[in-house]
Amino acid sequence: MNDEQLLRYSRQIMLPQIDIEGQERLLSSRVLILGLGGLGCPAAQYLAAAGVGEIVLVDPDTVDTTNLQRQLLYSVDDQGTAKVTAAKARLAAVNDGIEIETVHGCLEGEALFAQVRRATVVLDCTDNFTSRFAINAACVKASVPLVSGAAIRLNGQLTVYDHRQPAAPCYRCLYDEQSNENLSCSESGILGPVVGTIGTMQALEAIKLMTGFGKTLNGHLMIFDAMTMEWQTMGLQADPECPVCGQA
Ligand SMILES: [Zn+2]
């Protein structure tokens, strides 16, 4: 690290849990962020500011007026611009010492797997079950940890699927591909600080996975209710019959 980096990251380097070694790990890490909406915006902001060396931003959408209420990387002038392009410009303005790659589109199949395999950590910040199942399967196959967030209305949830750990459950252990209705923010509504809280905590879990300190949410699901300001944590079990991660 050079002097500029030591100064820029000094407030986290002084934490014994990060230290020089942790900062070097962040700088040599590659994070794949899938979805740059209300979850992906704060996650990308914190990870870029923290000095994650390579960040890959993936999103098929352009900035829309209705995004501005909660997706704080974007401004009025960005409307109609690809989210990944607008986000990259904002992130690079905060930290020009990291590499930011963009994919304007959806990653599927082999292209998704190729990106997942190169990542240190994957953040699922998407808003639909089809993407979530595909991302989960690619992370299990590549044995790359996945930080999964979701938020709708006044509720959020967060978990880590760390497939490097023995008996770690995966997303498919919890959710059946047949039985899920898709709830969208455009139909159900969402409050900005609710989704922002979850996205911010996704960045926190990603930093822990990259630097190796603390205990992550692997094997646990945190659920947030903004009505009561209560957090609940549920233990998760791997399903031995799971078609994605099961041994059978
Ligand atoms: Zn599974």
Image: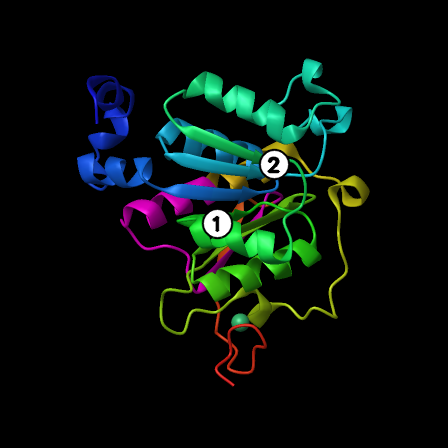
**Element at badge 1?**
strand
Label whose residue precedes the other's in the sequence (2 or 1): 2
**Element at badge 2?**
loop
The spot of residue 129 in percent (x, y) is 69, 57
The spot of residue 204 in percent (x, y) is 40, 42
Of residues 90 and 180, the one nearer the viewer is: 90
Q: Please tell me which residue is depicted at 76% across the width and 24% down the height of the picture.
A: 65
Name of the residue lying farthest toward the bottom: 248
Label placed on residue 36: 2
The spot of residue 14 in percent (x, y) is 19, 30
Whether 207 is among the magenta residues is yes
- The quarter holding residue 25 reads top left
Residue 77, above or below 219: above
Q: Amino acid at mark 2?
A: Leu
Residue 92, above or below 48: above
Q: Amino acid at mark 1?
A: Val
Q: Judge from the rendering whether residue 5 lies leftward or rightward of residue 135; answer left or right.
A: left
Q: Dot 1: within a 10 Å radius of its alpha carbon, few (fewer than 14), some, or many (20 or more) residues? A: many
Q: Dot 2: within a 10 Å radius of its alpha carbon, few (fewer than 14), some, or many (20 or more) residues? A: many
Magenta part of the protein: which range?
Answer: 202-227
Label placed on residue 122: 1
The spot of residue 236 in percent (x, y) is 48, 69
**In whole angstroms, how far apart are the C-alphas of marks 2 and 1?**
13 Å
Is there any visible trace of residue 71 in the rendered image? no
Give the colouring mode of the picture: rainbow
Q: Please tell me which residue is depicted at 75% across the width and 27% down the height of the picture.
A: 64
